Amino acid sequence: MRPRLTINGGFFNQRVTGVQRYAREIVTELDRLLQDDRLKSFLSAKIVAPAGSEFGPPLSAIALERTIGGGPLWHQFVLPFASRGVLLSLCNMGPLVAANHIICIHDLNIFLAPESYSWSYRAYHRVMDPLLARRAVRVATVSSFSARMLSEFGLCQPEKVSVIPNGHEHVRRWRPSLSRYAATEAKRRPFVFVLGSRARHKNVAILLSIAKEIDELGLDILMAGAPCHTFSAIEAQPAPENVRFLGFVSDDDLAALYQTALCFAFPSLTEGFGLPALEALALGCPVIASNAASLPEVCGDAALYADPTSPRDWLDQIKRLQSEPDLAQSLRAKGPGQAKRFSWAKSAELYLDLVISGGQSINARRSTALERL
């Protein structure tokens, strides 16, 4: 009988943030890899998802099976009975009773930044994440920083963890020319671009605290993000005239904003990976990132860094980019090369290696796995 792969499709009906984008891109690349005739005859694969879920692009090699229910209870009481072979969970959640489970835990922010989350969310993941990590045959995560945190907080031993990062290729599908900002922003003042969130660890308030000084430099701050509690609280106060809240923006909008911004500012106190910074690099946008957590690992020497607790640091780096055009141009040139170090295709190959080896080894590359077929 052919080895089987079941993919946890619980993310299908979730709003697409970084974690869900990770899952969707990995599944898309796995589907591409499994179209290889040798693999197709060796490994069968399906996604099990809640009823009403839609993946988006049609899948050729991975079958889709819909079941009743959804949410945390679906993971524990429906998914295990629909799974066969190796179960792959890509979005932090999975069943406790799966016999051959590979799970990706993206970060330990519930421990590092508990104030960012509701009491119920925090309580659930503080209990479930250690149990899932302990019971899984393999735990994946998205950066070396997150791998260290998994060990330091006692979720699992280092030898059980595989680092399988995010990729950058999805930005190639974005079409900035279709964005509502493609023409309008070119006619406005130069701006610093920020992606905001309700989570306190995103630390966007540090940029608002220096908005007046940024205004004096002749710069605006454009802050994108879906409406949420934090944004509402900020907007309820008199905002500096140079701060504009864009609300939700599409991927095409993101591309246009990255490409026309003076810089992308990413002041997070902690990040499991920091996908927006990688997207900005891939599109040639100068990045000023926090010098904390995974961000130096992701951005390398292709970004400027600032202390996430020092407003002066952020103002000084923004001034540097504005006053040193050669520096800005150097960062624009370096960004795409740094981004290419992170590939959805390569990450999917690493997952395929784990699946073929039953989750026991991370050393075999796909080529070695194929040689065994």
Image (spheres, helix red, strand yellow):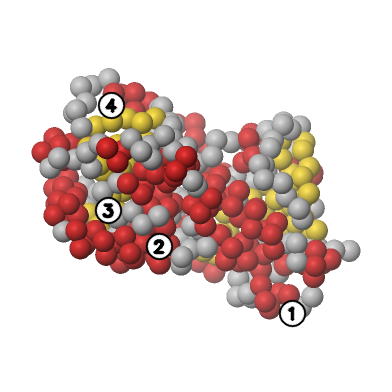
Residue type, numbered disc 3: Ile
Residue at image mark 3? 288
Q: Quick one: quadrant of the N terminus? A: bottom right
Q: Could you say whether the residue bearing mark 1 is in a helix, strand or loop? A: helix
User: Between residues 324 and 338, which one lies in front from this camera angle?
Assistant: 324
SS assignment at label 4: helix
When the figure is inspected, residue 33 is found, relative to residue 114, above or below; the finding is below
In this rendering, the label closer to the viewer, 2 or 1: 2
Left or right: 244 in relation to 79: left
Alpha carbon of mark 2 to alpha carbon of mark 3: how far? Answer: 15 Å
The circle drawn on residue 336 is 2
State the quadrant of the C terminus.
Answer: bottom right
Mark with earlier residue (2, 1): 2
Callout 2 secondary element: helix
* Numbered disc in front, either 3 or 4: 3
| Few, some or many residues within 10 Å of mark 4 (<14, 14–19, 20+) | few
Circle nearer the N terminus (1, 4): 4
